[in-house]
Image (cartoon, coloured by chain):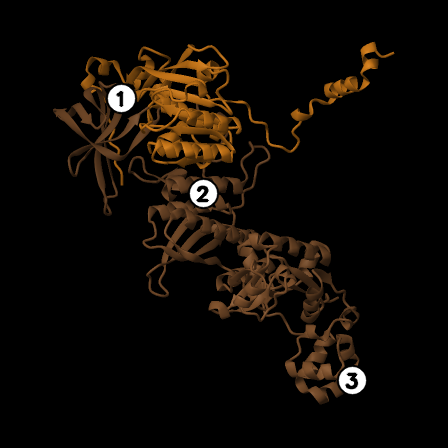
Amino acid sequence: MAPPEERAQPLACAARLALTRVGKACGVSLGLSPLSPLRLGCGIKAVDALLRGGLVRGRINEITGAPSSGRTSLAWRFLASATRAGELGAVIDCGNNFDASSAEAIGIELSRLLLASPGNLRCGLHCTEEVLAGGGFALVVLDVGSTSMRGIASSAWLRLAKRAEHSASALLLLSSTPLAGPSAFLSLSLRRIETRWNSPVAKKHPCLATLFCGLVVEVRVRRSRVGPAGESTVVYFTSEGMPLIACEVPGVGGGGKGEAGWEGPKAAQGG
Amino acid sequence: MRQKRRIACIAVDEFPLAALYRVEPELRGRPVVITEGVGPRAEVISVSAEARRLGLCTGLSATQAQAVCSRVVVRPLCADNLLGAENALLDLAHSFSSCVENAGFGVVFLEASGSTAMYGSEERLMAAVSAQGQKVGLTLRVGVGSSKVVARLAASVSEALAVPAGEEASFMASLPIDLLEPSHEVALSLDRWGIRTIGQLVSLPADQVVTRLGKPGWELVRRARGEDTALLCPSAPAREFVEATELEYPVDNMEPLLFVLRALLERLVARVKLQGLTAGSLRVSLWLAGMARGETEERTIGVVSPTDEVKALLALLRVELERKPPSAPVERVQVTIRPARPRPVELDMFSPARPSPRKLAATVAKLVAACGVNGVGSPYPLDSYRPGDFRLDCFPPARKRSAEGLDASCVEELSHLALRAIRPPAPVEVFCDRGWPVFVRGRGFGGRVVNTAGPWRVEGEWWREGSFSREYFDLEVSDGGIYRIYRDLASQNWFIDGTYD
């Protein structure tokens, strides 16, 4: 004899039983591409843990910081992660600052990257809207650079937020100061803690320092709509051509084994 | 067994009027006449059904037509409209068969045997032709038969009619003899004999008809029997798609001109789409006021990512025209599209979903319109010794690059530092102490040098013009920035070309 509630609502019970045995219809994807996760990680465990998985798709995310704070390096890491996973990325480069060699070294799959250099922020906003409206990009980076903010109303960010919401793309603003205000779902601020040069010799005699190893950067959540703000982590970005030395640097502070890797100035002879 | 020959005829009723409706669809349903000639004595050559109901007919002058009905729309015959409609009809026919004959003035014949096999039946083929006709703004009549004559007659009597093989005689028997378009003398003789239908002509002894009417009579009898073994004279499909229009008055403003261009592009794109192609490049020819006859101002615009979206193409035209506006008011405009095949993209079942190639191409075209041709693409580092050299390929790249196929796990845990390039390298003032930079000053930055790395000497391209020889330094400056600067050894000048960030 079936329980009384089952007798009362046979259809609902049958549906519940079918869901239990077969699974939810929306979770079955036969012949379809895998569903995109709602978060877009960067591959740096500490940062992904800080962001509860990564940047949020369909929202405005923001990375701010002074020049040489590592903001571009972090943004490119997110792009690298997305493009290597087979998704498309777009960079709207308002200041024409994109360097393909360093982007490739960071790991961005350039064949999956669309680069647009609009020349000014107004045009950059228009391009960003078009890319978001076109859809299909996992991450769209609007690199504001040092372009002027004059004449850009705050409603522009609201419009972008709306556009991002209707797409499956994470929109990432890259600037020196916070721009999107309350429209930003997640805002990170980066601060350089330390600049790494190659050895204690360099510390004692700065003029003899001949190798730039990298930056130690603090990543702080300035604003988040899902998690607590104010949390931070520390990341080390190594200069191109310094991987071995950087690998040997164990953590923040102290030279570590990196000191042993000092090689002195190189002369790269082209042609 | 040899397949029976089947010919399709696509015909447009009142061709000048149909060509006008294609350009000005809002005139449909209104009394319209088309005149040929100049001034009030221009002769009416085409009349719409609404105008015919009001008592208008061909042969009247424009003034007489307006006297009969004051609200009639009188339009002069426009060669551009006729040419555009004729080309659209040919493009439509070429989208169904490779063997197409242009019989002129809104009539084309095409080999239907192969196409019928593709569509399943002749009825489906005719329905598809009519549907495609709507897309290019033409109302079509379609007939299918075993010969050109039968197909033409079928198209004349019905909007879509297929005459089965072997039933040609019974189909044609009741049709009026005028449909065979006999010469004036032959028509008079037949009228005198009381011959009104094709069946009556066929029933006459052929040798007697030839004795009395001669060769034209024999030709007519053969056509009346449906005996037409003439082969189709195939015409080549269009390599370029052209639409032009003469403006009612010289246009000296961008917005009205763009309005006209949009209409031209819409008609062109509809034709390009029929062939399954996209726009590879655009050419705009402008006839300006005051220019000598035959002279035009031409603009060619490359479409980086071929697209068939009117909005994107119009944006490209707008950018080009705003960059260099026409030097005088525009009297006539012609747009030419050189087509390109859409790039085939094989979607991967196991990788994340990507936008459709058409949608992506439209997005790229819009970006090109905003940023310029050289401002959009997929970056590709050049095999060069010059630091920072890269080019922009079309997006997505046509060929897979070597690193393609790696997955996310290939991104190392190690995080490299990015460089923000400064383009072009900006000159800076550098103060040196025994050859080492100690103070640097440039536009927007400057300060005491805290740490220095370098120099790295880079030389290259000494075998050609534009050789370079530089000494690179990485500087940490007291303003907080870490910069990459270089000294050009030829000029001994200092430049900044990037910031580590």
Image quadrant in which the C terminus of chain A is located: top left
Give the image quarter of residue B173.
bottom right
Left or right: residue B94 versus residue A61 is right
Q: Residue furthest right?
A: A1
Crowding around mark 2 (Cα neighbors within 10 Å: few <14, some 14 to 19, many 20+) is many
* Residue holding disc 2: B365
Q: CA distance from mark 3 to mark 1?
A: 105 Å
Q: CA distance from mark 1 to mark 2?
A: 37 Å
Q: Amino acid at mark 2?
A: Ala
Residue drawn at 15 percent across, 38 percent down: B491
Q: Amino acid at mark 3?
A: Pro
Kindly indicate which chain is depicted in orange in the rendered structure: A
* Residue holding disc 3: B205
Residue drawn at 67 percent across, 70 percent down: B148
Q: Secondary structure at mark 3?
A: loop
Going from N to C along the chain, the mark reached first, 3 or 1, is 3
Q: Amino acid at mark 1?
A: Gly
Depth check: give the residue in front, B437 or A187. A187
Crowding around mark 1 (Cα neighbors within 10 Å: few <14, some 14 to 19, many 20+) is some
Q: Are marks 1 and 2 in contact (CB under 8 Å)?
A: no
Q: CA distance from mark 2 to mark 3?
A: 68 Å
* Residue holding disc 1: B481
The image shows residue A190 at horizontal and vertical percentages of 36, 17
Chain of the residue that carries numbered disc 2 in the rendered image: B
Give the image quarter of residue B474.
top left
Q: Is residue A228 above or below residue B500?
A: above
Q: Are marks 2 and 3 in contact (CB under 8 Å)?
A: no
Instruction: Report the mark closest to the observer, 1 or 2.
Output: 2
